[in-house]
Amino acid sequence: MKKEPHLRIIVRDEYIEGAQTYGGYSTSVVVDEKFVLRIPEHLDAAATAPLLCAGVTTWSPLSHWKVKKGDKVGVIGLGGLGHMGVKFAYALGAHVVMITTSPRKRTRCQTFRRS
């Protein structure tokens, strides 16, 4: 039988084995090293943070479906996820269609091609 990864949560310096957490207010957590990555010190943490959430969320389907140059990708909305999805798909060489009702966001999306 496959052993589940051990979970150790530290809240206010107390160990809670296998406990469920209710939010992101803890100051530390202990996890298996295969779930951790190091952000190089020369990168701005605030600028890098979106890659760890919206970036992973939008990269996953692009990677799963093996999006490549010439493929067509539709992205609905240009919020946090849409922004990353458009940029990644465009960087992969895909023909990107951004679906929105906002003329301002249409203009903003067009600037991605120049950046």
Image (cartoon, helix red, strand yellow):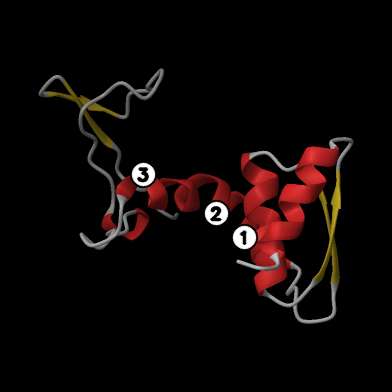
Q: Amino acid at mark 2?
A: Val
Q: Secondary structure at mark 1?
A: helix
Residue 58 image offset from top left, x and y in percent: 64, 54
Image quadrant where one finds the C terminus: bottom right
- The image quarter containing residue 33 is bottom left
Q: Which mark is residue 96?
A: none
Task: Answer few, some or many: residues within 10 Å of disc 3's Cα (few below 14, many 20 plus, some between 14 and 19).
Answer: few
Pointer 2 with pointer 1, Cβ within 8 A? yes
| Image depth: mark 3 or mark 2 in front | 3
Residue 100 image offset from top left, x and y in percent: 86, 41
Residue 32 image offset from top left, x and y in percent: 28, 51
- CA separation, marks 3 and 1? 19 Å
- CA separation, marks 3 and 2? 16 Å
Image quadrant where one finds the N terminus: bottom left
Pointer 3 with pointer 2, Cβ within 8 A? no
Q: Secondary structure at mark 2?
A: helix
Is residue 101 left or right of 5 when viewed as pictured? right
Q: Which mark sits nearer the N-terminus, 3 or 2?
A: 3
Q: Amino acid at mark 3?
A: Ala
Q: Which residue is mark 3?
A: 46
Q: Residue furthest bottom?
A: 69
Q: Amino acid at mark 1?
A: Trp
Q: Nearer the viewer, residue 89 or 112?
A: 112
* Residue lying at 89% horizontally and 36% vertically, measured from the top left: 101
Q: Which residue is mark 2?
A: 56
Task: Answer few, some or many: residues within 10 Å of disc 2's Cα (few below 14, many 20 plus, some between 14 and 19).
Answer: some
* Residue lying at 35% horizontally and 48% vertically, measured from the top left: 5
Q: Which residue is mark 1?
A: 59
- Residue 18 vertical position relative to residue 76 in the rendered view, above or below: above
Q: Nearer the viewer, residue 11 or 74?
A: 74
- Residue 101 vertical position relative to residue 96 in the rendered view, above or below: above
